[in-house]
Image (tube, grey):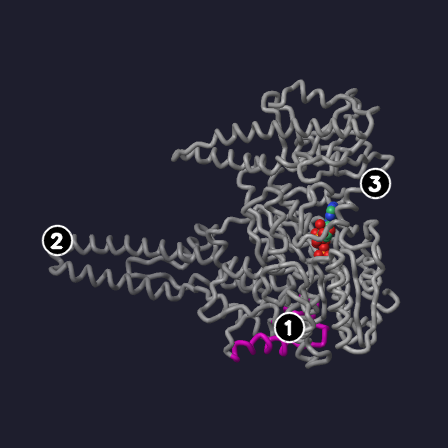
């Protein structure tokens, strides 16, 4: 064990020492911490017992978790150190910060602080003076920080450290990390979390936290770190342990899959919106939800001007279902159905055995009101059956007493007759206690033009040039065509109905839900999802500038402020962008400036420079693709391992992929809607599927005006998405005239 004395020694002053002397002192400390870890591992392993005992098994699990953390800490037990002083206190102190906390068990003194602990804020906060720390609930202290030290390691060896003070203020390690970045998948950033990100990830749970973050501002990364933080901060609060991440697709889930295990978080459900909600909806046989990709392709891949009237209807029908007016509409029908469930007639089994409509109503509306509708109905029928059985028994007793007094002869037959009568009467009655079949209930609502007209008015969509009849006919049409296919946009209304009628069944509400790329969801979709969270505890992260679907999504977060989530709502912003070089972000911001939205501000790139993005014109497509093939080889030779060749549509990408392969480009991956694995290397990808991901270099294929029209907001945003995927290089190869969005910008 690390002795008290040896730990205290570390607290001696190092000022006045040379850099080399300080480095060697730090190395000594590292060795000591490692020895401490080895001893902990030894005693921890010995503590794991072979047993059948339930308590021991639970303890084993805890010990195993501790051991896992110790193993993970072994090579790099800490990554930073802060020197600080509490205000008004004489002593200067220092603390090492690592991925997991380490204690001297004898003295209970911390050796290394967990990065999620309150005191680690001293390292993450921007300021060096009067840094407030909520050391424990309700107790806030102020600290001055004199130095923050970051350690660099090469394998097992501590090679360097960088110091930051109020005077120097630089963040060299961050820039270095961003320059090196080029791994296949997303990585954790605990060592270089920035102050604005720190504030977001440490925000309290139990609220809907909305984060508007520029492209590359770390939204996805921070969301995953936030889960690690919440798991730590609320570890003493029972049952705060099940988390859900909603990601746009399987490819994305694969892309982020390394981060949570690295942060020591396990068992998080990571899924898509469809998968999270579908299971709750009892669909009639043969029904299914159509793949959302179909509609996306319809809008993003259709020829310009193709059946404009139809597209306008499809778009309006989607936006309508995403509006909060859907909730009011469905609520009205649900309430009406609940209200009319119990028949107005009395339940009469015989002349003597009768339950009045009022009594049945009381059972349904008062006694069982805490249950979801379908369970309530079931409880009611069970209670009525019980009552019927009691009545039948009583009738039998009366009959038997009459036999004894000589009034009847054949009792058994008579009793059986009465029983059958009571059964029949109850069955007839139960037939009239309404039930619901969700899909037809829903269809019935949305296919009535009068309903749709009211719904559109409430959603503020009445003046958009599409009339209610046409929208109602669009909803009805799928049934007439017997396709039995429901759209992605029907999912939220159907889930909401299922939730209101059936509840969540055995599913426990999630302690916290993360929604990434949330700009693509509508208010009602987010509202429906909040039913899965305990007390509306959610983190909703997105970028309005990347809202690329014309038929869905958000253009202003403020619409989520009221009436959408059950509890408190707060909106935070991440303005700095860490992914791309200054030069790339300058081009991306120039593209975005063509979209007029007061809620979107240009991203501020972190000061990292690189090559100026360039566009090159070739005389034809053949030559253009040959140039791209040559560039891919050259980029690979320069160490750019993950490169995206981005075109607008899947169809174009298929063609480009085939032709690049024919030109000798080996192992290029074609990414299509159903892709579930991100493999790195060269990816030929339609722009809308590249969202959320990043590549060392991005090569744009023929970004001409026909594909990216400055007058179409979605085109502007798509091109913005494409540009902001690049870490180090952005290049365009075109044979048609370059889109005005890029002209002059590159
Ligand atoms: N504090 C940080 N330290 C080091 N790297 C960082 C930091 N913040 C972000 N990054 C890096 O910046 C890149 C972008 O992060 P991320 O993908 O999480 O951003 P995003 O906001 O979700 O982006 P987008 O909306 O464009 O998809 C990642 O490579 C991430 O590792």
Stretch in magenta? 452-481
What residue is pinned by disc 3?
170
Measuring from the top left, give residue 240's x and y in whole percent.
56, 42
Measuring from the top left, give residue 619's x and y in whole percent.
82, 77
Is 238 located above or below residue 538 in the figure? Answer: above
**Label 2: which secondary element:** loop
Whether residue 745 appears in this view of the structure is yes
Q: Residue at x 76, y 36 (%)?
A: 160
Is residue 472 rendered magenta in the image? yes
Front residue of this view, candidates 137 and 296: 296
Q: CA distance from mark 2 to mark 1?
A: 70 Å
Packing grade of label 2 (10 A; few <14, some 14-19, many >=20) is: few
Q: CA distance from mark 1 to mark 3?
A: 59 Å
Q: Is the CB of the residue bearing disc 2 within 8 angstroms of ligand 1? A: no
Q: CA distance from mark 3 to mark 2?
A: 104 Å
Measuring from the top left, give residue 639's x and y in whole percent.
74, 56
Give the residue furthest to the right: 744
What residue is pinned by disc 2?
405
């Amino acid at each position: 064990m690390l002795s008290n004395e040896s730990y205290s020694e570390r607290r001696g002053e190092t000022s006045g020492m040379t850099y080399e002397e300080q480095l060697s002192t730090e190395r000594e400390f590292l060795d000591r911490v490692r020895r401490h870890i080895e001893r902990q591992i030894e005693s921890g392993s010995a503590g794991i017992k072979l047993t059948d005992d339930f308590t021991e098994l639970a303890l084993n699990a805890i010990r195993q978790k501790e051991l896992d953390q110790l193993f993970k800490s072994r090579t790099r037990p800490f990554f930073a150190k802060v020197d600080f002083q509490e205000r008004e206190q004489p002593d200067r102190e220092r603390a090492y910060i690592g991925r997991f906390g380490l204690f001297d068990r004898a003295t209970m003194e911390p050796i290394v602080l967990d990065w999620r602990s309150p005191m680690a804020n001293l390292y993450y906060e921007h300021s060096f003076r009067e840094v407030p720390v909520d050391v424990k609930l309700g107790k806030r202290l102020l600290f001055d920080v004199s130095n923050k030290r970051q350690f660099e390691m090469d394998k097992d060896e501590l090679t360097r450290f960088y110091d930051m003070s109020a005077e120097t203020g630089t963040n060299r390690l961050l820039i270095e990390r961003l320059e090196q970045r080029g791994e296949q998948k997303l990585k954790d950033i605990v060592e270089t979390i920035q102050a604005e990100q720190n504030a977001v990830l440490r925000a309290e749970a139990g609220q809907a936290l909305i984060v508007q973050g520029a492209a590359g501002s770390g939204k996805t990364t921070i969301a995953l770190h936030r889960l690690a933080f919440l798991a730590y901060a609320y570890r003493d609060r029972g049952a705060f342990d099940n988390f859900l991440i909603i990601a746009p697709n399987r490819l994305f889930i694969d892309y982020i899959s390394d981060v949570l295990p690295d942060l020591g978080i396990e068992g998080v459900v990571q899924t898509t919106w469809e998968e999270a909600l579908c299971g709750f909806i009892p669909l009639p046989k043969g029904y299914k939800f159509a793949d959302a990709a179909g509609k996306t392709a319809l809008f993003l891949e259709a020829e310009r001007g193709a059946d404009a009237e139809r597209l306008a209807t499809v778009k309006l029908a989607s936006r309508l279902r995403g509006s909060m007016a859907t909730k009011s509409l469905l609520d009205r029908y649900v309430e009406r159905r609940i209200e009319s469930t119990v028949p107005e007639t009395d339940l009469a089994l015989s002349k003597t055995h009768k339950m009045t409509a009022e009594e049945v109503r009381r059972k349904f509306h008062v006694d069982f009101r805490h249950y979801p509708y379908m369970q309530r109905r079931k409880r009611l029928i069970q209670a009525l059956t019980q009552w019927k059985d009691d009545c039948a028994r009583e009738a039998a007793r009366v009959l038997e007493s009459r036999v004894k007094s000589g009034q009847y002869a054949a009792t058994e037959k008579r009793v059986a007759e009465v029983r059958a009568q009571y059964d029949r009467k109850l069955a007839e009655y139960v037939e009239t206690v309404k039930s619901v079949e969700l899909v037809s209930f829903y269809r019935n609502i949305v296919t009535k033009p009068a309903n749709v007209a009211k719904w559109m008015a409430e959603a503020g969509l009445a003046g958009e040039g599409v009339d209610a009849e046409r929208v109602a006919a669009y909803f009805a049409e799928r049934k007439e065509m017997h396709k039995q296919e429901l759209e992605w946009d029907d999912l939220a209304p159907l889930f909401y109905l299922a939730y209101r009628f059936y509840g969540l069944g055995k599913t426990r509400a999630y302690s916290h839900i993360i929604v990434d790329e949330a700009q693509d969801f509508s208010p009602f979709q987010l509202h429906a999802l909040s039913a899965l969270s305990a007390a509306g505890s959610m983190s909703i992260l997105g970028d309005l500038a990347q809202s690329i679907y014309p038929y869905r999504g958000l253009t202003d977060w403020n619409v989520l402020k009221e009436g959408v989530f059950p509890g408190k709502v707060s909106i935070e912003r991440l303005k700095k962008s860490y992914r791309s070089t200054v030069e790339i972000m300058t081009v991306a911001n120039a593209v975005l400036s063509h979209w007029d939205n007061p809620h979107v501000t240009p991203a501020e790139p972190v000061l990292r420079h690189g090559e100026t993005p360039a566009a090159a014109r070739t005389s034809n497509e053949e030559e253009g693709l040959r140039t791209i093939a040559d560039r891919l080889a050259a980029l690979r030779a320069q160490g750019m391992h993950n490169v995206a060749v981005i075109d607008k549509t899947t169809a174009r990408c298929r063609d480009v992929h085939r032709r690049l392969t024919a030109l000798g480009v080996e192992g290029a991956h074609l990414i299509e809607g159903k892709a579930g694995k991100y493999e790195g290397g060269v990816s030929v990808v339609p722009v809308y599927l590249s969202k959320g991901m990043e590549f060392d270099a991005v090569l744009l294929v023929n970004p001409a005006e026909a594909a990216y029209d400055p007058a179409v907001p979605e085109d502007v945003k798509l091109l913005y998405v494409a540009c902001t995927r690049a870490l180090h290089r952005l290049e365009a190869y075109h044979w048609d005239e370059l889109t005005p969005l890029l002209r002059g910008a590159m």
